[in-house]
């Protein structure tokens, strides 16, 4: 109960930040501070569009479910019990036989060259799959568990997560860019005006949020162009064969996440290519 409460705090904080930013920008800045009607309408329209795209992406990332790993990767309770009774080397040999018999497409392995097996889920881990201790399940192409959305970021919602960062960056930049035009006027006698205090505070908080979101966005753009997850960037992937990589080239890497329909690239829906448990590999040489 307590853990569940604390896990809800980061997403609620983000929503509170959005609500505070909305009040300070739309009410205090556009409606009460700005003078020109045309500028008010333009700023409010653009702001609402950015806000809608951000919240849509945010909730899509947060509410997205993760596909179950196919049954052929699973072991029955009795098979798992027998497997755990063997020594590690013998158990690995059995897992390798299962991989061959079931014709599982497994290109990666543990650093000790053994088949990656999840004891909690009693299943062979497909490539790029990891067990999340927070979600208490294996997540396909797991990037990381994000407390800010209260969900794992993986195969089914990585695109939505990247779009969340993109729209957060644009939203914060637009907020700061339009309010900063009046920064000198706002700063003058700020201590004597509640309106100016709210605008100044909003500018600072949203500005810092924009710096953070832009850093994360460009970091994940770098991962995206290399077809790499956060976990893979922190821990080198071990392949069962030498000379293999998941990097298919920048364009193909992008398409595998965002899809090949340009009309859907900026819409926070799942358009990833593939099934999440089998991945195309490329040879580094030859």
Image: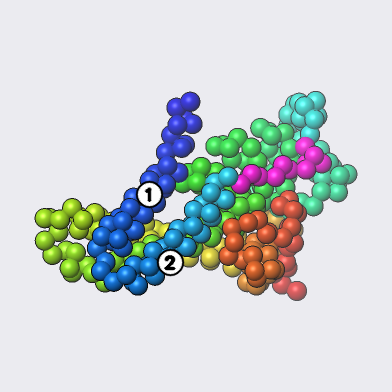
Residue 98, position in %: x, y?
Answer: 83, 41
Q: Locate the C terminus by quadrant.
A: bottom right
Q: Is residue 75 magenta?
A: no
Give the residue number, with chain letter if any, for mark 2: 46
Q: Is residue 71 magenta?
A: yes
Above or below: residue 33 compared with residue 64:
below
SS for dot 1: helix
Q: Which residue is at a point 35% across and 72% down the rendered structure image?
A: 38
Picture quadrant of residue 95 = top right
Question: Which residue extends farthest front?
Answer: 37
The secondary structure making up most of the magenta span is loop
Residue 270 showing in the rendered view: yes
Task: Note whether 95 is above or below 212 in the view shown.
Answer: above
Crowding near the residue tagged with mark 1, few <14, some 14–19, many ≥20 C-alpha atoms within 10 Å: few
109 or 46: which is nearer to us? 46
Q: Which residues are magenta?
A: 64-74
Left or right: where 75 falls relative to 174: right
The spot of residue 62 in percent (x, y) is 54, 46
Decide which of 146, 21 is in the foreground and name it: 21
| Residue at screen point 66% across, 32% down | 120
Residue designated by label 1? 19
Q: Which mark identifies residue 58?
A: none
| Left or right: 29, with 130 as reference point | left
Residue 31 image position (x, y, % from top left): 30, 61
Q: Position of residue 201 (x, y in %)?
A: 25, 55
């Amino acid at each position: 109960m307590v853990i569940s409460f604390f896990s809800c705090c980061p997403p609620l904080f983000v929503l509170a930040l959005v609500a505070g930013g909305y009040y300070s920008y739309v009410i205090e800045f556009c409606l009460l501070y700005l003078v020109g009607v045309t500028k008010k309408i333009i700023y409010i329209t653009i702001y609402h569009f950015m806000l809608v795209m951000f919240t849509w992406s945010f909730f899509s990332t947060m509410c997205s479910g993760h596909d179950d790993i196919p049954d052929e990767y699973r072991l029955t309770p009795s098979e798992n019990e027998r497997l755990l009774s063997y020594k590690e080397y013998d158990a690995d040999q059995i897992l390798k036989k299962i991989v061959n018999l079931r014709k599982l497409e497994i290109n990666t392995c543990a650093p000790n060259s053994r088949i990656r097996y999840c004891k909690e889920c009693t299943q062979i881990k497909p490539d790029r799959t990891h067990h999340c201790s927070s979600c208490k399940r294996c997540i396909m192409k797991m990037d990381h568990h994000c407390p800010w959305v209260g969900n794992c970021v993986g195969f089914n919602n990585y695109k939505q997560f990247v779009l969340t960062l993109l729209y957060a960056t644009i939203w914060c930049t637009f907020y700061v860019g339009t309010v900063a035009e009046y920064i000198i006027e706002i700063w003058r006698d700020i201590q004597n005006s509640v309106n100016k205090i709210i605008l100044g505070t909003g500018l600072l908080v949203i500005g810092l949020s924009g710096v953070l979101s832009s850093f994360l966005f460009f970091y994940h753009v770098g991962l995206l162009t290399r077809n790499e997850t956060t976990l893979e960037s922190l821990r080198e992937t071990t392949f069962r064969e030498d000379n293999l990589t998941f990097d298919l080239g920048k364009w193909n890497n992008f398409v595998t996440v965002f899809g090949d329909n340009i009309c859907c690239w900026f819409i926070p829906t799942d358009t990833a290519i593939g099934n999440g448990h089998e991945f195309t590999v490329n040879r580094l040489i030859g």
